[in-house]
Amino acid sequence: MAEAGNRHFDIIIVGAGFAGLYLIHKMRALGLSVRVFEKGDDVGGTWYWNRYPGARCDIESIDYSFGFDPELEQEWEWSEKYATQPEILRYAQHVAERFDLRRDISFETRVEKAVWDDETSGWSVTTDKGDTLTSRFFIMATGCLSQPKDIDIAGIENFTGEIYRTHSWPHEGVDFAGKRVGVIGTGSSGIQSIPLIAEQADSTTVFQRTANYSIPAGNGPIAPEKRAVKDRYRDYREEARWTRGGVPGPVAMDLALVTSEEEREQRYEKLWAKGAISHLALEFADLLVNLEANETLGQYARKRIRSKIEDPAKADILTPTEFPICTKRPCLDTGYFETFNRPNVDIVDIKKDPIRSITATGVATRDRSFDFDALVFATGFDAMTGALLAIDIVGRGGQSLQDKWADGPASYLGLAVEGFPNFFTITGPGSPSVLSNMILSIEQHVEWIADCLDHMRGERLDVIEATATAETGWVEYGTASSDMTLFPLAKSWYMGANVPGKPRVCLPYVGGVGAYRRACNDVVAQDYLGFRFDGPGGTRCNDGLVRRQQPDVVALLEMLDDLDLPPFESMSAAEARATSEAMSAGNPPGPAVGDVVDGEYPGAEGPLEYRLYRPQTEGPHPVTLYFHGGGWVLGDHASDDAFCRDLCVSADSIIISANYRHAPEHPFPAAVDDGFAALNWVAEDIEELGGISGALAVCGWSAGGNIAAVVCQLARDAGGPDIKGQVLITPVVDGADDSPSMTDNAEGFVLTRALMDWFWDHYADPAVRADPKASPLHAADLSNLPPALVITAEFDPLRDQGKAYAEALGAAGTEARHISYPGQIHTSFTAVGAIPTANDARQEMAAALRQSFRAMEPA
């Protein structure tokens, strides 16, 4: 019951797990009145309910604990690497007692309905006890895995034996000695409980729909080096806050596909022995984004799994093959696969022999009948949204959360929902939640909310609500993030696929704890961007998107920011070149091609290098002459290697990347003179190079786009060579550009206005920058040029001049298309492997080249 006589609180919270406990502590510190409603009779949340045999956390105990109080983290001693459910529950109880939290909790009370009232600017909350209470703020702290999935097997009511569910295990435990037990489900709870059930039961039969990846936990006493973390807990916790999964560890920048098979095997062996799923998908940078790379880990895991199972037929059933590893949460086990070597344990593949019904005596599949004394259902949860939608939550205008989320959850940061003022969700859909160390993510959410409420009090604001713009933007950003990965390939509860009829969307934010924390911090730094406030202090709203760039672009920008490099424009040309080369050394490689040949061609003033990429298909091939970027100062014929490989494969064209002389040693017009010399050389020797006579196009990026555009004009004016098409990628075409894009994107997106000025100052004196050989946009005649595709990026200083060039070409009668890609920056398009969201643009470039060459084919 609520406190006698008190029917109004500043905050009403649902759930007394770790989130609810920390909320009480933080809200009290703000001087706010709090009431928590918990349907169980004690604290602990998921660790109160899930008492099945073998229940353990899959994050190491040292990490899976509160970090908000230094004394708490020092006084509590964990007994094992992975704590059991009873120990974690004791920890939750200890926290409740230490901070006297129970006095603000109403146990054995379920919230049935919560309704927002515009007139009072507050919530009306009704419980199953018949109480109706009010509050200014309403917070759901119900956890991500707390609403059991409905058991959708016919006939369960007919079974005359004992029925147990892992999510609501009897507190007194169960004795299976001498019993025939059937277990349905092989997710985490099944994998943890089956070995212990099998030790007791006379026989155990497991019914499995989908085989799961699981690695040995290697549980035992906490290793000395891990226990020593307590000596530096403050620094350790801070490090964890900026990692991907919320647990400190090495960050892999290398790729599985470019690592030798021998080294990969050795690293997977160490990873397997470590028994830590928080690092499993992070061993190589490409494991969650490249199916071929993922398969190297999947093959290793399947080999290890099969090695534990003696019966080949059982091994076939238990070995996972249906989804990429780590796209469902991998499990930790203690003797799970070995359990199936026991003579009293069997496994049934219900994909091949599906369950038809539960009978009075057991289970009937299509082909067999099984008799049991007890059935155990380990059938999982309606994850992340189930508990939120189990309560009838009604927001502004009478809209229910159930209706708003009919097509999938929409929230801002997984914290707030448009149309539901003064409403927060802890680790809700759209936050890292289940893909992270949950306690660390809980702390981050609670602390963000506490700071927000303190801010509102200081500004005399009563109501906060996410805007539709911000919410939609965050949902789209989260979807773009997951679409870059392999997660959508699995029918997992991450995707809502385990619940019939549930919308198929990626529920957690996959970008990681650190990236998410930066986004939340950026919201605050921009005056709570995307939130609307009302109160005596006035009405205010700074609307917008906290992440306007594509997620991989954001990750790249954050990585560069973390490096804290001096700007290129502060360096000499030699220093800038050395820095650029060092940064490029770690770039992902491009795809394999048929052949790569390095050589020299006759430049305007002497020999210069080129690199030729030949397709794997049978030649001869059309030829594309490519000019690299770098502001006429940086780069060389090999600096865009991955992009040239990708273009070679996608366009099925020989790519010849021609170097040119660089400024300041060789200023304007040296670069374009060399470009035109390269064009003439390729045209003359095209057949000797393996090309098709006359099938020649040009392509260039940035300063290379400038050269490509200029050589097309020079070739027209000189009467040849004939060029079939030009692809200009974020080209420099106007030395006098002062457009909005140059101003709006002047800082923060790799190519800055200051850097562009530095490039121009090295390359061409202001007096000659209007020359069409420096600024092809200023040419007097733009007619009769090769068909052009001009690619630009939304967040590029050069965006508007590229658009202007395409428009000028079209106005002069030259066939020209312009495509500007939203969320991209100047360096996106050549960053093969690093910016997968630019893949569509790269395919468009390849398609344009293929079309150029098709145009010369006879009808």
Image (cartoon, helix red, strand yellow):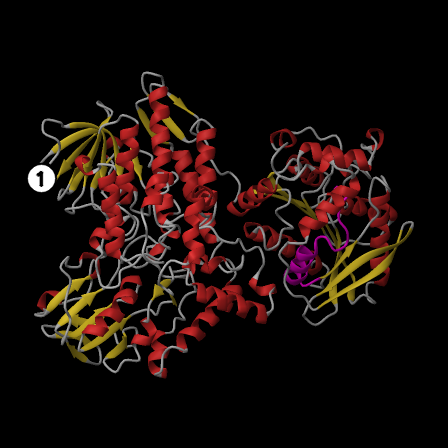
Residue 254 highlighted magenta (yes or no): no
Q: Secondary structure at mark 1?
A: loop
* Residue 674 left/right relative to 275: right
The answer to which quarter of the image holds residue 266 is bottom right
**Can you say which quadrant of the picture contains the N terminus?**
top left
Tell me if residue 618 comes above or below residue 32 in the rendering: below
Q: Quadrant of the C terminus?
A: bottom right
Which residues, given as a range, are shown in magenta?
631-653
Nearer to the camera, 540 or 458 = 458
Q: Which residue is denoted by mark 1 in the rendering?
A: 129
Q: Using the rendered view, name the quadrant where residue 597 is placed.
A: bottom right
In this picture, is 322 found above or below 737? below
Residue 415 seen by the camera? no
Q: Looking at the picture, how far across and down is residue 851, in whole percent?
A: 66, 57
Q: Position of residue 786 (x, y in %)?
A: 74, 49
| Image vertical order of residue 524 relative to residue 556, above or below | above
Q: Residue at x 56, y 45 (%)?
A: 553
State the residue at coordinates (80%, 57%): 610
Q: Is residue 714 visible?
A: yes
Q: Residue furthest right?
A: 605
Horizontal side, residue 6 vs residue 458: left or right: left
Residue 429 image point, x, y percent: 35, 46
Total numbered labels = 1
